Image (cartoon, helix red, strand yellow):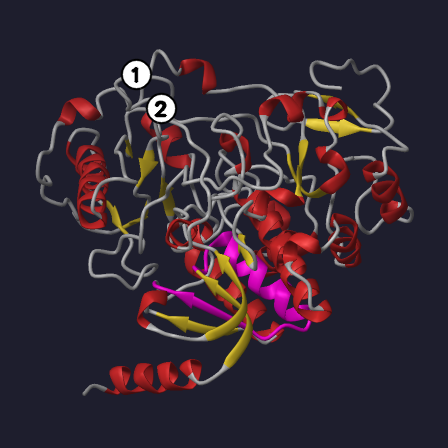
Amino acid sequence: MTLRRLILVALLVVACGRQYDVVIVGGGTGGTAAAIEAARGGARVLVVEESPWLGGMLTSAGVSAIDGNYRLRGGIFGEFTDSLAARYGGYDALKSGWVSNILFNPAVGAEILYNMAREAGVDVMFGIRYSDIKVRHRILIDGTELGDLALSEGAALLEDSRTLQDMTYVAVLKWYDHDVTIPAPEDYDPQHYIHCCDTWPAEMTLSYGALPDGHIMLNWPQGGNDIYLDYLSLPREEVYRKAKNRTLGYIHYLQTELGYSNLGIADDVFPTDDGLPFYPYYRESRRIAGRDTMTVEAALRPYDFDLYTRAVAVGDYPVDHHHNQNPRAEELSYLWFGKIPSFSVPLGVVIPLNVEDFLVADKAISVSWEMNGATRLQPVVMGLGQAAGALAAIAVRTGRHPSEVPASEVQAVLLDHGCYLLPFLDLKPSDPGFRELQEAGVRGEVKGTGRSVGWSNETWINLPDNEETQSGN
């Protein structure tokens, strides 16, 4: 038996004999935030993660360009981005590619998140599946990419027959001083990529995901490495193979057709045999039927609904769906840039209707198919994960089911930790009066005005002078 195997067996024995308050299956973006928050709240927390890293789509899937919430940096999300800025020499250093204001090497992000989890006292078991171990727990949280645990635990799911978003097997590339052209993968078809530079020249498509250390994140939707697959129904191995081949084909096309023969898969980021991330970037998951369901309508007209009174996380990204590779792309084109103001998401989206002591902390939240295009982004998922962790810790500490904990108790903890509940831009968490403004907002005593402004949507209590509302209320 190898040393690694001996260590793994020892860890399994220890874990199987220990009682945890909270077990989180999947150390993704939301699962990691949930673990850190629950542990800080006094809970004994275990994360079971199949890959060797924490962070999910931010790290393990290679999507190391954060979409949205640049002006809404609070809570664990704000801690994470502050740590990135400290690593790279300030926030301006993170603006290395034009797709985002915050880009970073996935390995750096994984290290930061692991350090945060370790400092909080989280136990982590890497490289195994939850089904392979038996541990006692009080509350179980689904932090998987596709809501796999929600399915196996019998959580009621939202029924929706509409098509899944395109997925992507991201790659991180680097420049070499020699030819690194790879062979064409199985089923290579250059026709998939001939339109990759229709909107922007090749230099722009590559600088899109330029990382601060000179690497390039390859996650290009227009004639690039997006692919449409019914990945919730297909075997995982088939999904990985087909998605990887689409990406390898794009790299081969860049090298052979566009002349970038010295640009290849980085050999110093992911510790995998092929240098690619541990798993793909899924833009969509199964979704539970929760005690609240967030919709586009609630984002557009928040005060026509009461969801804002239970707000625990915020987002400012539009309803952005990827369907370019779908045979029904034209039919679905109205979803590519659905305008909404910035929004808040209520606590009930992480609480299933029919399963007690079980929560979700990634993209499997209770959200409409359309609204998933905005709630799927990393800052929103991280914020909801932190809320799930806070809820779990309160439930453990007070001996209640999570469904019995009022949203106001979770909101109080999140405000203690510098989180936004509502996306008011008037005050930042460090400003005097921030907490009071947020509390007044969820009580409905003050109301914001929302508007859609390009990719960065806004909500203000006091709208800046000479500005007009474009959408929302």
Say left or right for 128 vs 410: left
| One can see residue 133 in this view | yes
Residue nearer the viewer, 442 or 289: 289
Magenta highlight on residue 406: no
CB within 8 Å, label 1 to label 2 = yes
Residue 72: x %, y % from top left? 69, 41
Which corner quadrant holds the N terminus?
A: bottom left
| One can see residue 129 in this view | no
Local packing at callout 2 (Cα closer than 10 Å; few below 14, some 14-19, many 20+) is many
Give the labeled residue for mark 1.
328
Give the labeled residue for mark 2.
323
Q: Secondary structure at mark 1?
A: loop
Range covered by the magenta-colored residues: 26-50
- In the image, residue 101 above or below residue 180: above
Residue nearer the viewer, 267 or 315: 315
- In the image, residue 213 above or below residue 342: below
Residue 123: x %, y % from top left? 50, 75
